[in-house]
Amino acid sequence: MFPEKFIQRIRTQEYIYAEELREALQEPSPVSIRINPLKWDKKPLESEPVPWCATGFYLDNRPSFTLDPLFHSGCYYPQEASGMFIEQIFRQIVRTDGYLRVLDLCGAPGGKSTHLSYLIGSGGVLVANEVIKARASVLAENLAKCGSTNTIVTQNDPSAFSSLPGFFDVILVDAPCSGEGMFREGVAVNEWSEGNAFHCSERQKRILQDVWPALKANGILIYSTCTFNPEENERNVKWLTCKKMAEAIELNISDFKGIKEIDHQGIKGYGFYPGRIRGDGLFISVIRNTGKSSGMKTGIKKEQTGDLKRTDLEITKEWTTFPSENIIRSGEEIHSFAGRAEDYYLLNGCLKIIGKGTRICTVKGNDHIPAHELALSDGIRKDAFHKAELDHSQSLAYLRRDNIVSPDIPKGWFIPTYMGINLGFCNNIGSRINNYYPVDWRIRMSIPGSGAKNIIFWDS
């Protein structure tokens, strides 16, 4: 089932139990989700906690996430459990009581980015980056669903960040790799080769070299892969610490049974091996910049934006809790950008930004059309719009952009909700209700009549 060269190599890795790992990789991946506390405070029934993540849970079986309105509204994110370990790094190493600038360099599809956004909170800014255009769009969608207001989404090659010397306190490089930790999926097995693994190792070095200048003095870089290959893992970390003024930081894993500490020529890494932990394969290491940074770039000009009118500011004040100094207008679009003004304009001068923060509305003539992102955002005023509670089948109809039955609600903009959670916007024009769910996000699959039986059930 697995490539012979892979089997031969893991038999020589002293910290891997090769036969145990082979057997575990032939079993289905555990199903796990991470709750979004900005929106949801219930626990799934018949679940077990992920040991290293306070909001992570293992499920007994895989529900149909597509048929669950709470998934589409950002109440939880289906995330592989091993990857949730970044929470422990923040708890043990990163101080979150001040203003933090964090970069997730390889962010798509968004599991770690949405987690980082929550860990940072309102006292900082996350730059979530993805170089591939289609994947960057998926990243922006998943971050919008989670509703956080502290994230800027960019689409740049890692080399672009060298123009931001000493800017970031924390950088996560979840590097593209040979994918051995995902060998439970046939695609990962079929794509593996020794040549591809070597190519990945060289690309990872380039990525680390490119992004390192953007890390401030005493800042930390979190390096992770989903492979077991030492050339892509601990040896790359050792290469970086020899190349730069850097040190690998030791973590306390005594509370987490099964995680393997890897000590390679004085650097520390941590291996997550199926059969030993309940999750997919992962390597992670934390590196501190012990050198000096050349200082942050300053003097970037503000972007050319449209003039905000009095009515624009009145609408944003009526609909949102965003500070007025963060409101900008670009053409017909009104946004609240994430982070401090000087940070936003600096980033805008150096990077290709595809998500400024939260899109609030589109201006058409004298009308302000609320954006879908606003309905899902933590920055919306709770009493800004009327709400109409939908049942499960009505919610799925809305998420398909089907016509929905007119609820007993006044004319104008309103928010359909499911279990009290915002789904998006509709406009009651009297004769009908216009569904404003984004076309690109709509559910395309056919919905069985028993769809409500295959979703997550929650503690009351």
Image: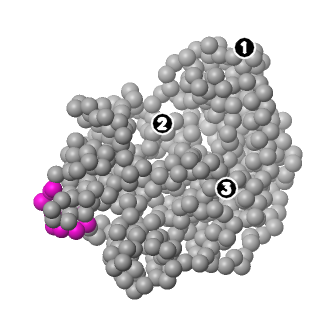
Q: Amino acid at mark 1?
A: Glu
At x 54%, y 44%, the residue is 109
Magenta segment's dominant SS is loop
Q: Which residue is mark 2?
A: 50
Q: Quadrant of residue 301?
A: bottom right
Q: Is residue 7 above or below residue 60?
A: above
Q: Amino acid at mark 3?
A: Asn
Q: Which residue is mark 3?
A: 156
Q: Position of residue 445 (x, y in %)?
A: 35, 36
The answer to whether residue 352 is magenta is: no
Q: Which residue is mark 1?
A: 4
Q: Position of residue 429 (x, y in %)?
A: 20, 65
Q: Is residue 290 left or right of residue 143?
A: right
Query: Range of the magenta residues?
Result: 406-414
Q: Is residue 172 above or below residue 190?
A: below
At x 32%, y 40%, the residue is 68
Q: Is residue 452 left or right of residue 137?
A: left
Q: Nearer the viewer, residue 54 or 44?
A: 44
Q: Mark 1 to mark 2: distance in Å?
A: 33 Å
Q: Amino acid at mark 2?
A: Val
Q: Nearer the viewer, mark 3 or mark 2?
A: 3
At x 59%, y 55%, the residue is 128
Position of the C terminus by quadrant:
top left
Q: Residues within 10 Å of mark 1 (few under 14, many from 20)?
A: few
Which numbered disc flags the more N-terminal residue, 3 or 2?
2
Q: Nearer the viewer, mark 1 or mark 2?
A: 1
At x 69%, y 22%, the residue is 16
Q: Is residue 332 left or right of residue 292?
A: left
